[in-house]
Amino acid sequence: MSFYDELQKLDWEEVTHSISNKTEADVRRALSADRLGLEDFKALISPAAEPFLREMAVKAEQLTVKRYGRTIQMYVPLYLSNHCSNFCVYCGFNCLNQINRVKLDVPQIMDEIAVLKDWGYKHILLVSGESPHLTPAAYYEEVVRTVRPHFSQVSLEVQPLQAEEYAKLVEAGVSFVCVYQETYHEGAYPKYHPKGLKANFRYRLETPERCAEAGIRKVGIGALLGLEDWRTDAFFTALHLNYLERYHWRTKYSISLPRLRPHIGEFEPKDPINDRQMAQLICAYRLFDPEVDISLSTREGSAFRDMAMHIGVTSMSAGSSTEPGGYAKPKKELEQFEINDARSVSEMAEAICAEGYQPVWKDWDIWL
C-alpha cells in the first residue's frame, strides 16, 4: 500500500465541492481547535475563511515562533543542467523549447561554488532538468561528493529515482530531497505532462516514500499552484503530508508553494492564486502542521516574502539563478523561469533583520 492507494479513495470534484461548501462556523471551529484535522484544513483554505485572514495570521505567527523562533533558514539553488526529456507544457526546460542546453562539469560547478561560498551560503539545493540519460543518478552522486566538503547541507531537486539510488546519495551526503507532484489531479495530469518520465503520475507520487525508505532525512513536497484548482491541490498536498508523517514518521517534511511564473512558452495558469489567497494558504498549512518547514522561493515578490516571514514561512532563498552556470557566468536565455525577488543575498539578509528575524546560514551539519 502507498499514498497512491489512499488517493484513489477520494474524488477530485467531490473534494472541490466540499471545500467550497465550508461555512463560517466550520472556520471558527477550526480556529478554536488544538489539533486540526483534514476537514479543518478544508475550512481554512475555503472562501469562507477569507474574512478570518488576520486571525489566522496571528495564530500562524505564534505557532511558528514557538517552534522555530524568529529565524529564516537560508538556502540557494544551484542549477546543474537544463537538459530535459519531459514535455511539461508550463516549463522553460520543456524538451521542445529551442534553447541552448547546458550540463555543468566539475570545474564549472566549482566556479559556481566559489561564488556561493563567498555569499555565505552553507545550504545548497542542487537542481536539474530531468534527463536520465544525460544526468543519471551517478552524475548526481559525483556532484554531491564534489560539493559536500563546502556545505553543511546538500539538498536535491532532480528526477525521481529508485530507493537504492537515493540510498547511495545519502551515503554521498544528501540529506534533503524535494519532489513536487505539480498537481494531484490524476485525470488532468497527462495534459500537463504528455510525454517523458514525468508522465508517470504514480511513480512520481510515490517518490517521497522511496526517499523515506532510503534514509533521506527530510523530504519536500508541494503542488505547482495555478495548474488546477489551487484549493483542491492544497488539500491533497496536506493529505499527502499527513500520510507521510503517519507512515514514515522518522523523516522530516517541507512544503513549498510555487506559483507559476513567466517562462519560455505560452502556457497560462488555469486557476491563478492571488497574494491574499497565498497568504491564507500559508497560514492554513502552519495551523494544520506547526512542525512542517514552509519554503518560499524567489518566485515571489519582495514585499510578499517580507510579509510571509510573519505568517509561517521558515525557509527562503536569495540571489537565486535558475540557469546552469548562472552565478559565475549569467546567461538569461538558459533560465527555467523568471525570478520575482531580485534582491542580493546581503539585501535579503538586511530585510530579514529589519522584519525582526535572523537569517540562519548553517542550521545543522549531517556529519556531526
Image (tube, rainbow, N blue to C red):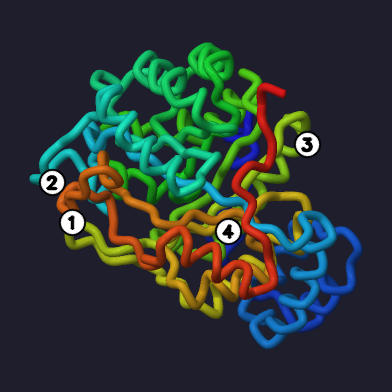
Mark 1, residue position: 264
Q: Please say if 99 is above or below 16.
A: above
Q: Which residue is mark 2?
A: 97
Q: Point out the image quarter for the N terminus.
A: top right
**Disc 2 or 3, which lies upstream in sequence?**
2
Is 354 on the left-hand or right-hand side of 267?
right
* One can see residue 244 in this view: no
Residue neighbourhood size for the residue with mark 1, other residues' Cα within 10 Å, grouped as few (<14), some (14–19), many (≥20): some
- Disc number at residue 234? 4
Q: CA distance from mark 4 to mark 3?
A: 18 Å
Q: CA distance from mark 2 to mark 4?
A: 29 Å
Residue found at the far left of this picture: 98
Within 10 Å of disc 4 (Cα), the crowding (few <14, some 14-19, many 20+) is many
Q: Of the two numbered discs 4 and 3 on the same chain, state the one appearing first in sequence.
A: 4
- In 3D space, how far apart are the residues under numbered discs 2 and 1 (Cα atoms)? 7 Å
- The answer to the question of whether label 4 and label 1 lie on touching residues, with beta carbons closer than 8 A, is no
Tell me whether circle 2 and circle 1 mark residues in contact (CB < 8 Å): yes
Report, in whole angstroms, how far the alpha carbon at label 4 lies from the one at label 1.
26 Å
| Residue 116 seen anywhere in this rendered image of the structure | yes
Residue 139 % position (x, y): 34, 18
Residue 198 sits in quarter: top left
Q: Residue at x 53, y 59 (%)?
A: 296
Between tags 3 and 1, which lies in front?
1
Quarter of the image for residue 244 reads: top right
Is label 3 in a helix, a strand or a loop?
helix
- Residue 155 falls left or right of residue 79: right
- Please name the amino acid that badge 1 sits on: Ile
Viewer-proximal residue, 28 or 60? 60
